[in-house]
Image (tube, helix red, strand yellow):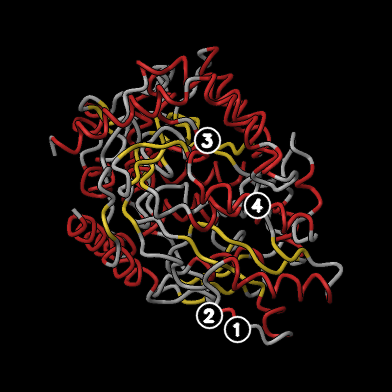
């Protein structure tokens, strides 16, 4: 399976080069181009109208349709999308992901099956997306188009180079949280205006750095198959989860996090610190060239370690960023054509990512596809990971020119999770999952941010989970996974 991923990515590299050389479809649709709504999370762009107009001018003659992109702030995105699904509001193309309720949305019949649309109206999608297209399949039907990007999951530490240089911090050798901790204290003691460890959104240290070796099975990130037991277990039934929660509490107590994490009903405002550069360390799912992408996005140098553990090919990494077509869309044919163009036409893909040449970005080296952003241009969404085929995107001067070759090597180093391709049947446990979710919403925001000593909440939390049916869910998912493994 890994070799199939590598073959697909190699083909994408070749197709990207052809697209940049001018190879694109030349069919022209009659009549006015049809607007297709595209909903994405992220910050609203001041000059979005200019980019949408340029997309109309470019895509209209080719496919007879064009995207009208709208970004919704992260704080409103989840509720806005779910309300639209519940009320059956008309939508066309909508971002979704395993971590963004994809499985629940499929069960709620939110997304159209795409097999026939692809085969009839967008056949080039299969070659462009390749193996990744096998991820969002249920009962033989494709329900979304994944972003072609890294094919494996691994986390990295990232650092503000201004501070690593100032204090001669050997960031390349930092692997574990224990390795990092003395330097967090160093920054805390000497840089009162700097956040030592920047929490991403409302996430946590365990998810960001240490859980990628767990074999997640597509019921959120909390139920995981463990090879050491041969069973599915809830994360808070594992001792290492509580050990990491205890470290989070210790770091919170020592003042390593931004103060906004205390607002459990809101966001951690990490983007504000990225913009002003007043942070030292950060961790996230990584890939080759991620530090260069962050540097280009924020205008100062950010450095990153290599993978903290062996990269793992998991189902959820294949489902980590996707575009679906809503059941309420009245333009499914035009929508699939827009998605095909996003995945096969380099100029169009980069228009959506970086805007209009000369207004939002300029070429540093057009032949090599190296660009720089134009400051205060009104368009800089920094959503390459969501806007489909990343192998088509331009590079910034801060990025490694061998970035995509490094992606191939990264994927080659990955191991396959034993449960890659497994999709849980949630129907027998829907009631318990809903109850567990309610319990989780009460306790997790406090525990994962370290706001209280987890030892004081452990017995209470586990009892609430037990009452919600967590044991029944573990048993049912274990049965399903063991049947899946037996029939592979």
Element under label 4?
helix
Please name the residue that numbered disc 4 is placed on.
Answer: 246
| Closer to viewer: mark 4 or mark 3 | 4
Q: Given the current orientation, which residue lies at the most extreme top position?
A: 87
Mark 4 and mark 2: span between their CA atoms? 24 Å
Q: Is residue 162 left or right of residue 132?
A: right
Q: Is residue 207 left or right of residue 33?
A: right
* Mark with earlier residue (3, 1): 3
Q: In the rendered image, which quarter is residue 119 located in?
A: top left
Distance of label 2 from label 3 (alpha carbons): 45 Å
Residues at discs 1 and 2 in contact (Cβ within 8 Å): yes
Number of numbered discs:
4
Residue 287: x and y in percent read 43, 63
Question: Which marked residue is nearer to the observer: mark 3 or mark 1?
Answer: 1
Residue bearing the label numbered 1: 170
Residue 68 is tagged as: 3
In the image: residue 161, left or right of residue 209: right
Whether residue 246 is visible to the viewer of this picture, yes or no, is yes
- For disc 2, the marked residue is 173
User: How far apart are labels 4 and 1 at the CA level?
Assistant: 26 Å
Give 463 or 421, whichever is nearer the viewer.
463
Dot 3 falls on a residue whose secondary structure is strand
Q: Residues within 10 Å of mark 3 (few under 14, many from 20)?
A: many
- At a point 51% along the width and 51% down the height, the residue shown is 240
Mark 4 → mark 3, Cα distance in angstroms: 46 Å
Q: Residue furthest right?
A: 192
Instruction: State the SS at label 1.
Output: loop
**Is the C terminus in the top left, top right, bottom left or bottom right quadrant?**
top left
Quarter location, residue 311: bottom left
**N-term mark: 2 or 3:** 3
Q: Is residue 270 left or right of residue 26?
A: right
């Amino acid at each position: 399976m890994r070799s199939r991923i590598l073959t697909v990515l190699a083909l994408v590299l070749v197709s990207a080069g052809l697209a940049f050389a001018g190879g694109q479809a030349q069919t022209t649709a009659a009549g006015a181009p049809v607007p297709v709504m595209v909903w994405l999370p992220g910050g609203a762009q001041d000059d979005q109208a200019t980019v949408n107009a340029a997309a109309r001018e470019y895509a209209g003659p080719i496919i007879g349709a064009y995207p009208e992109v709208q970004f919704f702030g992260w704080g409103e995105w989840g509720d806005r999308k779910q309300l639209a699904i519940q009320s059956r509001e008309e939508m066309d193309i909508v971002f979704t992901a395993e971590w963004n309720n994809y499985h629940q949305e499929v069960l709620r019949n939110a997304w159209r099956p795409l097999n026939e649309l692809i085969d009839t109206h967008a056949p080039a999608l299969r070659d462009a997306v390749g193996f990744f297209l096998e991820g969002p399949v249920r009962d033989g039907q494709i329900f979304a188009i994944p972003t072609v990007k890294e094919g494996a999951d691994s986390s990295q530490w990232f650092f503000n180079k201004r501070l690593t240089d100032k204090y001669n911090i050997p960031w390349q050798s930092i692997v574990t949280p224990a390795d990092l901790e003395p330097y967090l204290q160093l920054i805390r003691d000497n840089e009162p205006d700097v956040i030592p460890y920047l929490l991403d959104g409302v996430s946590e240290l365990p998810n960001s750095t240490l859980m990628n070796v767990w074999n997640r099975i597509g019921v959120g990130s909390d139920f995981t198959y463990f090879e050491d037991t041969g069973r599915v277990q809830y994360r808070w039934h594992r001792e290492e989860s509580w050990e990491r929660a205890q470290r989070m509490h210790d770091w919170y107590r020592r003042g390593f996090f931004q103060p906004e994490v205390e607002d459990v009903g809101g966001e951690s405002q990490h983007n504000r610190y990225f913009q002003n550069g007043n942070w030292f360390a950060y961790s996230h799912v990584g890939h080759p060239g991620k530090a260069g992408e962050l540097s280009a996005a924020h205008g100062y140098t950010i450095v990153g370690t290599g993978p903290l553990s062996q990269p793992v090919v998991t189902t959820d990494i294949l489902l980590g960023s996707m575009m679906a077509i809503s059941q309420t869309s009245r333009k499914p044919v035009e929508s699939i054509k827009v998605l095909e163009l996003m995945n096969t036409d380099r100029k169009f893909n980069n228009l959506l990512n970086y805007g209009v040449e000369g207004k939002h970005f300029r070429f540093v080296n057009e032949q090599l596809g190296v660009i720089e952003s134009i400051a205060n241009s009104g368009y800089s969404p920094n959503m390459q990971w969501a806007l489909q085929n990343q192998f088509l995107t331009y590079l910034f001067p801060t990025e490694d020119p061998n970035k995509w070759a490094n992606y191939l090597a990264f994927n080659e180093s990955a191991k396959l999770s034993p449960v890659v391709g497994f999709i849980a049947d949630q129907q027998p446990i829907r009631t318990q999952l809903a109850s567990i979710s309610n319990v989780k919403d009460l306790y997790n925001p406090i525990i994962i941010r370290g706001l209280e000593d987890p030892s004081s909440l452990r017995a209470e939390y586990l009892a609430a989970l037990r009452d919600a049916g967590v044991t029944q869910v573990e048993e049912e998912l274990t049965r399903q996974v063991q049947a899946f493994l037996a029939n592979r």
